[in-house]
Amino acid sequence: MPSLPHHENPTPRHSLRNQILEDRPVNQDGFVQEWPEVGMVAMDSEFDPRPSIRIENGRVAEMDGRERADFDFLDQFIADHAIDVDAAERAMALGPGTVARMLVDPNVTRDEVLRTARGLTPAALLETVRRMNIVEIMMGMQKMRARRTPANQAHCTSARDNPLQVAMEAAEASLRGFSELETTLGVVRYAPLVAIALQVGGQVGRGGRLTQCALEEATELDLGMRGITAYAETISVYGTESVFVDGDDTPWSKAFLAAAYASRGIKMRFTSGTGSEVQMGNAEGRSMLYLEIRCILVTKGAGVQGLQNGSISCIGVPGAVPSGIRAVAAENMIASMLDLECASGNDQSFSHSPMRRTSRLMPQIMAGTDFVCSGYSATPNYDNMFAGSNVDAEDYDDWNAIQRDYQIDGGLQHVGEAEILAARSRAGHALQAVFAHLGLPPITDREIETAVYAHGSNDLLPRDVLEDLKGAQSVTDRGVTGLDLVKALHEGGFADVADHLLTVLRQRVSGDLLQTSAILDDNLEPLSAVNDANDYTGPGTGYRPSGERWERMKRLRHVTSAENPELEVS
């Protein structure tokens, strides 16, 4: 029998199924092996220190295997300002297994966990969450979230930095339920106009939305001091001394900046996230979560009310290594475990896979956090100037359906088109009145009409960018403040919008926005961990959508009448 031709390097034959799998979106994602020596490991590194502490003469003499004389400046800041030396030895003696069980045991209250957590070192916190699987981390988050009622934050941006679009997106986002609204710029010089637009739009409809404009720190602080914005959160902290030094910063300089915001009643969070240090090439051989825990403790030590974490713009790094998304959920829970307000990420896109993007949401939306997204893109993705978002304006109906499916509150609700169009129109005309009052480049009725019915910036009429930039500079030069906006709105015939904005400014004076997890409710009253403390203690307790809120959440774009299948009732 003749033999078959022999090929030394035959081309391997693949199945059709393999080809279909190869073409799936998930296989466009980046996955890498762990490399602990450079920090490319989520939370299980042999190079992380082991938990230990020694207290001498009322201060930390040794922490996680390092003597005080060998502390870097993060160790020193954490030891002196974040760890309660009176609680430390008792808390550390419990061991990570006991603390992990306290987090999931409904018989242990949130306050008991807080009293223990304040005495734990970075390595002890890491060892605790390493013992917890993702469901246990979600259980811990459900109990440790500061505010009883979850909320959400939106990104309202424009690829053209069009202030009219930002105002309308803010008004729509407010109606849809977002409690905080954030913007940023493609061209930084546009900032004063876009920040004004966000503030005006956020006070239309429900009103009382808190706004911020993410910029370099000096301009961001200036806008806050003037009352054009109400909060800030893009003040970054890092987990290694070398990365801090690269940014010409220290924990003390960040604490000083935080004090500047607090002195004017401006709400403020720091920002950090797993993966940032390894992305900047200075992880110093530690795991991503260990370094993030140091960031959380620096935030605690600086006296800041909260933290935006959840990897944020670095999500592609933990998302590429094993157990990386579990580590991201753990960092959110640790922030809450240390009694910080937590804006839990879910902002930047990290995967081509719709299933992975939805999976990324689950630990936060299921458990509920102070702000499930930080933020959710209220625009189409091409308009999101924070980079592509994990969820955007085209996902509203999906989000609302998920809330309804599980009876969980992700902070949003369905709103009918007529109500949205009315709010967008009113926001446009309110901004038109403010621009006219301040002598800024005019907004025409045709621009408003076009923007009301637009989906994104591609559908808008172009503005005169040069004149807008001159107008933006004049806002800075003339020292325009939030009270000037109130006056402009009132004199322009928008007394209700003016009243909403004045209420936000009054809350700054009272200091109520400095409470942990502070937002304003539908009556423009502060809702925070002070008057809405999380009281979850097991089944049947804590927050769950009910009453009017649950009835509102049952509504979707298309819900059929039970009595008449031909009739839609939403």
Image: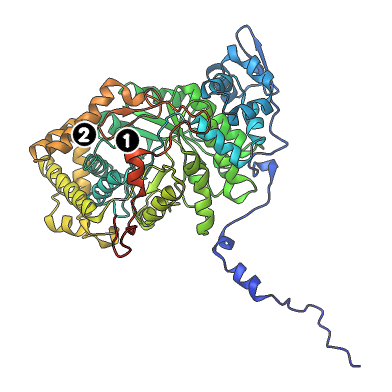
Q: Which residue extends farthest front?
A: 563
Q: Quadrant of residue 305?
A: top left
Residue identifier under label 1: 219
Q: Position of residue 280 (x, y in %)?
A: 55, 42
The residue identified by callout 2 is 501
Callout 1 secondary element: helix
Pick out the residue farthest to the right: 1
| Mark 2: secondary structure | helix
Q: How many numbered marks appear?
A: 2
Could you classify mark 2 by the number of other residues whose Cα lies within 10 Å: few (under 14), some (14-19), or many (20 or more)? Answer: many
Q: Quadrant of the N terminus?
A: bottom right
Q: CA distance from mark 1 to mark 2?
A: 21 Å
Q: Residue at x 25, y 59 (%)?
A: 454
- Classify residue 350 as left or right of residue 476: right
**Which mark sits nearer the N-terminus, 1 or 2?**
1
Above or below, comparing residue 380 to residue 403 in the picture: below
Protein image colouring = rainbow
Please state the horizontal and vertical placement of residue 192, each as a whole percent of the image: 25, 41
